Image (cartoon, helix red, strand yellow):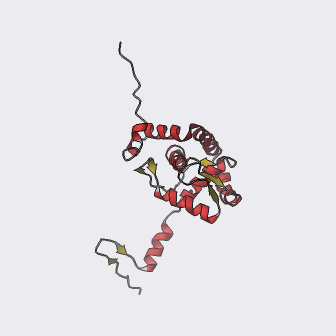
Amino acid sequence: MIEKQKVLKLSDGTEILPYKEAIAIAEKRESPDLLVRDLILLLLYARKTKPIYGRTMLMKQVFLLFEEILKKYNLKIQNPKFVPYHYGPYSFTVAKVAEDLAFAGYIKIEGKKNTRKERFIITEQGIREIEEKWKKLNENLKKEIENHRIAWDQMGTDGILKYVYTYYPEFKEKSKIKDKYKDIKWGRGKG
């Protein structure tokens, strides 16, 4: 007869499970269809020959891909955990994963860091890595990612920030530049 081991409880409330119990729980969890790394690679793959210029643009495009496109489809997606920050929605996970992708050779980061001249480019290794997932995506989703990537690139950094601040005002509360993008109130004028 196997005796059930006790759960160790730390002073902060954290529970440490016995190894076999922890493994059993981990095996029951469903893994996501798309990870944060996939979101970055999908955006870059959608326009292989066009880099994304600047970290702010990369961050906002991943945010909009997650919020406005992928949530409409029945996919399990790793949550990038966006929070209000200096330039609107920011994900420490996305920032770290982008650096990890560059270190692993899936993307190249060129140009001066934290400027609009900084470029995020998918490499041949990155293309090979994401190609199979891209092929498995719904055709409408692929078209939507491609079209939005073109539109977001054309908006530029100021345009995408204005869009995000307008439609996601809860993410501009901690922004250093929120006053640059005033809310526009549409309606009837006087008279």
Q: Identify which residue is drawn at 37% across, 47% down.
A: 174
Lateral position of residue 145 relative to residue 191, left or right? right
Q: Residue at x 47, y 54 (%)?
A: 91
Judge by depth and name the residue closer to the eye, 100 or 37. 100
- Find the residue positioned furthest to the bottom: 1
Q: Residue furthest top?
A: 191
Give the farthest residue toward the left: 11
Q: Is residue 82 above or below residue 20?
A: above
How many marks are shown on the rendered structure?
0
Instruction: Name the residue located 55 percent from the left edge and 54 percent from the top edge.
Output: 113
Q: Position of residue 102 (x, y in %)?
A: 61, 61
Q: Position of residue 177 (x, y in %)?
A: 42, 42
Is residue 25 something that shows in the picture? yes
Q: Nearer the viewer, residue 129 or 90?
A: 90
- Compared with residue 185, is residue 101 higher up or lower down, i.e. above or below? below
Q: Nearer the viewer, residue 23 or 170?
A: 170
State which quarter of the image contains the N terminus: bottom left
Picture coordinates of residue 38, whole percent (x, y): 59, 56
Image vertical order of residue 188 relative to residue 62, above or below: above
Residue 35 shows in this picture: no
Q: Does residue 187 appear to the left or right of 129 in the view shown?
A: left
Residue situated in front as seen by the camera: 17 or 39: 39
Q: Residue 157, percent across and down? A: 53, 42
In the rendered image, which quarter contains the C terminus? top left
